[in-house]
Amino acid sequence: MAVEMIRDKAYLIIRKTYGDCEFRPGAHLNVLLGPNGTGKSSIVCAICLGLAGAPKLLGRATEVRDFIKHGASQAMVEIELYSSSGRNHIITRDMFRSENRSNWKINGKATTMKEVWLNAVFVKKIDQK
């Protein structure tokens, strides 16, 4: 599996606020460098949350709502996964503060968190659909 692209909107990590952001890793080694507070950890958090990782894995918060930008009611993380079949797959997580819940999509179709996790781990499963 390779992450092709990450997009996030209204995303918050430890008192730092970000608007829309897009990150496109290269095909080989990617290194994130920068001073404290510039968003390096935010990219790791977006990947974890976008691929159905539990918030407590990140050691920053225990609930999804804690990762939503202050003042925003919802946030979105979208991750495009590279597929050797030639068709990349897009996983989208919409997070809602008031209900502390998420909606999941794979290639625009509603799905469950379990399916997203399984597909992130076993990318070939998406190709079979």
Image (cartoon, rainbow, N blue to C red):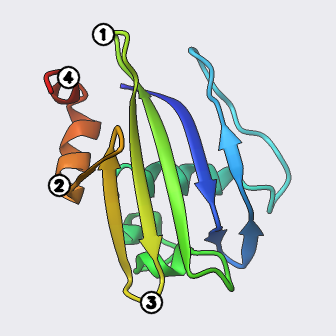
Q: Amino acid at mark 2?
A: Lys
Question: Label 3 to label 2, Cα distance in Å?
Answer: 22 Å
The spot of residue 107 in percent (x, y) is 34, 38
Of the residues under marks 3 and 4, which one precedes in the sequence? 3
Q: Who's the residue at 55% across and 68% down the image?
A: 75
Q: Label 4, on which residue?
A: 124
Question: Label 1 to label 2, Cα distance in Å?
Answer: 23 Å
Q: Label 2, on which residue?
A: 114
Residue 1 vs 67, above or below: the answer is above
Q: State which quarter of the image contains the C terminus.
A: top left
Q: Who's the residue at 64% across and 71% down the image?
A: 12
The spot of residue 105 in percent (x, y) is 32, 50
Instruction: Give the SS element for disc 2.
Output: helix
Of the residues under marks 1 and 2, which one precedes in the sequence? 1
The reply, left or right, for residue 85 in relation to residue 23 is left
- Give the crowd class for mark 3: few <14, some 14-19, many >=20 residues within 10 Å: few
Of the residues under marks 4 and 1, which one precedes in the sequence? 1
The spot of residue 114 in percent (x, y) is 17, 54
Disc marking residue 98: 3
The reply, left or right, for residue 51 in relation to residue 7 is left
Q: Which residue in the rendered view is the most extreme toward the top?
A: 85
